[in-house]
Amino acid sequence: MKSLCLIRHAKSSWAEENTEDFERLLNDRGANDAPKMGRKLFEAGFKPDLIISSPAFRAISTARRFSRELAYDPDFIVADMRIYDAHESTLLDLIRHIPEQYKKVVLFGHNPALHQLTHYFTSNGPLEFPTCAVAWFDFNIENWKDINAGNGKLSYYDYPKNIS
């Protein structure tokens, strides 16, 4: 059994006109939503043994805030440039190459790829995937390379406006 949690970065700021997309910071709402959602995920029973994140500032900042709530050392977050501005197929390839010793993995990234991936895994994927949304999938597989369309079960889905 493998479990994968897809998490979209928290709400980012557009306040700085000259800031590159990659460098955008979290806004106040995003900075507050991330730990709340991390706590909710922890309370739901998800305890990762690997966290992988886009290195974009808004994504890695979200990952760090979640990791503290998930009892995961933020120093062990793996930043992977392939996640930034990725297509669904790129993320799928990355997931299929996760080392087998990891059973519960969190991937922090961006839309539209994350939202597309939720629908790839299961036909009952969420209709929307807003900022800081969390989708936890369980797969009845032994190896990450065996992840395919439709073989995921959506076990948990939530987002900040749902808990406010």
Image (cartoon, rainbow, N blue to C red):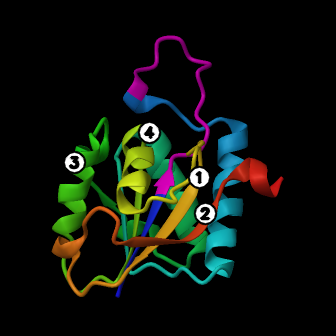
Which residue was labeled with disc 1? 133
Q: Are marks 4 and 3 in contact (CB under 8 Å)?
A: no
- Magenta stretch: dominant secondary structure: loop
The amino acid marked with disc number 3 is: Ser
Q: Earlier in the sequence, mark 4 or mark 3?
A: 3
The amino acid marked with disc number 1 is: Ala
Q: Are marks 2 and 4 in contact (CB under 8 Å)?
A: no
Q: Quadrant of residue 149?
A: bottom left
Instruction: Residue 156 in the image: state x and y as whole percent.
Output: 59, 70
Q: Earlier in the sequence, mark 1 or mark 2?
A: 1
Q: Are marks 1 and 2 in contact (CB under 8 Å)?
A: yes
Q: Secondary structure at mark 2?
A: strand
Which residue was labeled with disc 2? 157
Q: Please name the residue shown 16% across and 67% down the image.
A: 97
Q: Label 2, label 4: how many angstroms apart (C-alpha)?
A: 16 Å
Q: Is residue 142 left or right of residue 112?
A: left
Q: Earlier in the sequence, mark 1 or mark 4?
A: 4
In the rendered image, the vertical position of residue 100 relative to residue 91, given as above or below: below
In the rendered image, the vertical position of residue 9 relative to residue 96, given as above or below: above
Q: Label 3, label 1: how many angstroms apart (C-alpha)?
A: 20 Å
Q: Secondary structure at mark 4?
A: loop
Q: Please name the residue shown 68% across and 80% down the image.
A: 43
Q: Please name the residue shown 35% across and 55% down the image.
A: 120
The amino acid marked with disc number 2 is: Tyr
Q: Earlier in the sequence, mark 2 or mark 4?
A: 4
Which residue was labeled with disc 3? 89
Instruction: Residue 151 in the image: state x and y as whole percent.
Output: 34, 71
Which residue was labeled with disc 4? 111
Q: Earlier in the sequence, mark 2 or mark 3?
A: 3
Q: Which residues are magenta?
A: 7-21
Mark 2 closeness class: few <14, some 14–19, many ≥20 residues within 10 Å? some
Mark 4 closeness class: few <14, some 14–19, many ≥20 residues within 10 Å? some
